[in-house]
Image: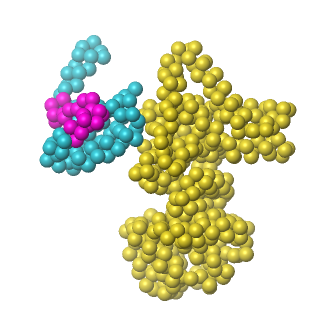
Chain colours: A cyan, B yellow
Amino acid sequence: MQYLVSVIDDKSNPGSTDRQPAISAFNERLIAEGYWVFAGGLADTTAATVIDYRGEQAVFSDGPFVESKEYLAGVWVWEAPDLDVALKLATEASKICDRKIEVRPFQ
Amino acid sequence: MSDVEEAITRVHHEEWARVVAALTRRFGDIDIADEAAAEAFATAVERWPADGVPPNPGAWLTTTANHKAIDRIRREKKRGDKHKEAQMVYDDDPPEPLGAIDDDRLRLIFTCCHPALAMEARLALTLRMVGGLTMPEIARGFLVQETTMGRRITRAKAKIKAARIPYRVPSAEDLPARVSGVLAVLYLVFNEGYLATGPDTDPVRHDLTAEAIRLTRLIRALMPEDGEVAGLLALMLLTEARRTARVSPSGELVRLDEQDRGAWDAALVAEGHRLVRERLAAGVAPGRYQILAAINAVHTSARDVRDTDWSQVVALYDQLVRLDPSPIIALNRAIAVAELDGPEGALAAVEGLEDKLADYHAYHATRADMLRRLGCSQKSRAAYDKAIELASNTAEIAYLTRRRDQLG
């Protein structure tokens, strides 16, 4: 079962910025234990571009598709046998990243 | 009720959770299990009056429900639903080694009370899947529309499936936290029955308190060594024992100090006391339910309210405050202190909680009572007004109104 694990930061109350070494060590462990599928940190939401080609013409617009205080700062994809395993790892991840984590299953 | 109807009711109580739990394990799908179990019981209602009750009703129901589930899966497979086919395979896993406690019903309970589900979904799902209550019964219990309750349960079942909430007893390491989650669900069910809210409802909904006790007894049978399970059961029994004495014939709340203690259920009191003694003898540091049960045991040991050992009650609250520094516990401790040392000091302790409890009716009711005892009628009246405004239990409102109107 694969889970999308989103790291959520808060613009008005950001998590600490010195987490990278701890996150790298955690990633090593995820790989060694067979949970790791993919991971990536994201650039600031201001670097996002939204494309809408549902109508006649493609419209490009600057910025994220939704402005909010909380935003997606990075993602993982994990392979885990069930939600309990994913939640346990996500609990550790939240501490390590000093940020909220959302766990959502793929279909 | 005929003998057969009685047998069906009894078997439903005894076997429902077992049938659902066994099917969930076999088919790996809580929704299929629920539907097939319901169909099997419906078949029993149809057939048993003519055919007689089978010698082993539980086995008959499990077999019938298994057939119903397989029929449904075949029907859906014919419709090309590959998804269901995959699920048949998914749950043939052998049970994992789990140590001393394992029972399909425990797996079911832990799944229904999973912390990834919303609390109201946990309550509803537990009553449906473990308790076997019907959707209208659950909706009535929580005063919501049947469709709302139906959606809540459907969504919870869908999340269990989509997110793969596992069907197993948690590991020893996670067990204490997960058990306390299960007990929190049962205690909420009990309290919703005991302190029923809403303007047009009975002040006590016995169906919910009885169901909470029945499910807690089941968990106690499955986990006899767990102190907090025993503590919660004792707490419920000692509370339930006072149920009939707690509301007057005119529908007014009767406080503990004014209750007719002869009307308490002696058998429930005795059973609750036995459990509390058992936990004391275990010599293990008690958790919050065990301490709450011990407090209730002190109250129910006094034949007359004047015989209450208040110093013991205060000592137990001191112990509880160390485990649970919540303002509500502090409020209850202050009430006991008022009995032991008089209301002056206790009132100061109560008023120190105002920041945290300003929206809680019991804060204002407690303060009103202490002010009344200190002869401050005007302040007391204002506090009763506030308590009445915030209270939602009909018996409690009636009691508070009488007390206010008795002020000079």
Residue A60's place in the image compared with B245, above or below, is above
Query: Residue at position x 60%, y 19% from top?
Result: B74
Quadrant of image for the C terminus of chain B: bottom right
Q: In the displayed image of the protein, which residue is found farthest to the top?
A: A56
**One can see residue B319 in this view:** yes
Query: Residue at position x 17%, y 40% from top?
Result: A24
Q: Quadrant of residue B229?
A: bottom right
Q: Where residue B24 sits in the image (x, y, percent)? A: 56, 34
Number of numbered tags placed on the structure image: 0
Query: Residue at position x 23%, y 47% from top?
Result: A96
**One can see residue B364 in this view:** no
Question: Relative to the observer, which residue lies in front, A33 or B111?
Answer: A33
Q: Quadrant of residue B393?
A: bottom right
Question: Relative to the observer, which residue lies in front, B266 or B390?
Answer: B266
Q: Where residue B331 sits in the image (x, y, percent)? A: 46, 72
Q: Where residue B89 sits in the image (x, y, percent)? A: 50, 24
Q: Where residue A25 sits in the image (x, y, percent)? A: 19, 42
Question: Relative to the observer, which residue lies in front, B249 or B7?
Answer: B7
Question: Relative to the observer, which residue lies in front, B8 or B192?
Answer: B8
Query: Residue at position x 27%, y 29% from top?
Result: A37
Residue B99's place in the image compared with A43, above or below, is below
Q: Start and end of the magenta stretch?
A: A26-48
Q: Is residue B77 left or right of residue B345?
A: right
Asked whether residue B181 is drawn in magenta, I would say no
